[in-house]
Amino acid sequence: MIADMQEYIRQIREMVSNQLDLTRNVEDDEIREVIAALVLEESKKQYLSLTEKRQVMEGVFNSMRGLDVLQPLVDDPSVTEIMINGPHHIFVEQAGRLYRKNVSFGTNEKLENVILNIVSKVNRTVNEANPIVDARLMDGSRVNVVLPPIALDGPTVTIRKFPEDPMTVEKLIGYGSITPEVAELLERMVKAKYNIFISGGTGSGKTTFLNAISNFIPKDERVITIEDSAELQIKGVQNLVRLETRNANMEGKGEVTIRDLIRSSLRMRPERIVVGEVRGAEALDMLQAMNTGHDGSLSTGHANSTKDMLSRLETMVVSGNNIPIEAIRQQIASAIDIIIQLARLRDKSRRTIEITEMVGYENGVFQMNPLYRFVERGEDKNKRVLGELTRTNHAMVHTEKFRNAGLPDQV
């Protein structure tokens, strides 16, 4: 029985490093062979059970080529998010709830080495001069890093896991996020090229929802996706261009922003532009794209209600552009056709709580037409919120895109 597994793994790793010339391109299989041989040899000096041998071999390999103590958490399909607050405090989200894990990196240095390993693989840099960075793992999982001195208690890492199977509308129906009736309507809206904006708070499932409905895009169209960190999984579209932002280098040069990518995409003959999330001045470029013949655009934004989302869009545009507020509101009203509001309810479930049509802008007020609203019916014995999206009494006003696409216009 090993008293200190982490220290034992460190010792074996040191032996492996001494045996291998890590300055050359060493294959994973070669590293695994050396680790296995050393563990077998060392187990003759100190008895190791089969489980312990496996744990040591995986631990040494993960510390060299994987994500060290994080690798088992990344590999665990039940873990949806990993939060690291310094080397000793690691939390995970499982089934919508947070749990602390009894694992540790031991030192800031070990955690920083894992961080550098993550960001270097996607050509990002993070250091004291540039202490905040967004990156992704090789499987597409989204990573945010904040280093000291900004993070006061050591390096902070948040990993939003990338699902192995892409989200589908069928799964959203199964989870109770939408109804089959709403799914059929959304399919027609996407095919008819309505400009759809998905709004929601933190962890409400905006990117997941965008992923699901983006697969309604006809497979013969040219689609351009624009993201901070590539997460979208659009399947079946052959003419697909995936664009990702880039941070500035050590000299402060070479930055490529969402705004740069939207402007560039307009010269790439897109039939659809899908923007992962708008957060700043690029909102204007997205709205202008929607207003200049690029119908069918999809995007998301962070807000707790439809009204808040419109206010945030105004603020985003104003922050980077010298345009009168009335002109901005007119742009928003003419660009966006449908707003889908998502929320994470008290039982941790993610639901669609409103689907609203943008009718227009008159007398300083956005004219909104709610088509569906979430109606709660209490809770079951497990405290799960009961309810579903329910059709309002309001008829949809702008149905001409359905007719132009040759699709049924009833809603």
Image (tube, rainbow, N blue to C red):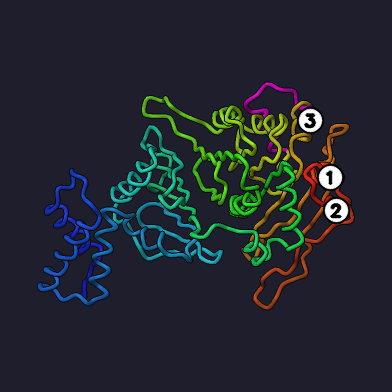
Image location (x, y in percent) of residue 282: 61, 31
Q: Main secondary structure of the magenta part?
A: helix
Residue 260, placed above or below residue 127: above
Residue drawn at (52%, 48%) of the image: 231
Image location (x, y in percent) of residue 270: 61, 34
Q: Is residue 161 magenta?
A: no
Cα–Cα span, label 3 and label 2: 27 Å
Q: Earlier in the sequence, mark 3 or mark 2?
A: 3
Q: Is residue 314 magenta?
A: yes
Q: Secondary structure at mark 2?
A: loop
Instruction: Left or right? Give the position of 398 relative to 344.
Output: right
- Give, as a three-letter code, the residue at label 1: Thr
| Along the viewing direction, whichever of 41 and 348 lies nearer the viewer | 41
- Give, as a three-letter code, the residue at label 2: Gln
Residue 318, placed above or below residue 46: above
The residue where tag 3 is placed is 330
Instruction: Left or right? Give the position of 262 relative to 402.
Output: left
- Give, as a three-letter code, the residue at label 3: Gln
Q: Which residues are magenta?
A: 311-326
The residue where tag 1 is placed is 399
Cα–Cα span, label 1 and label 3: 20 Å
Q: Earlier in the sequence, mark 1 or mark 3?
A: 3
Q: Are marks 2 and 1 in contact (CB under 8 Å)?
A: no
Q: Earlier in the sequence, mark 2 or mark 1?
A: 1
Give the quadrant of the N terminus: bottom left
Image location (x, y in percent) of residue 26: 21, 49
The residue where tag 2 is placed is 410
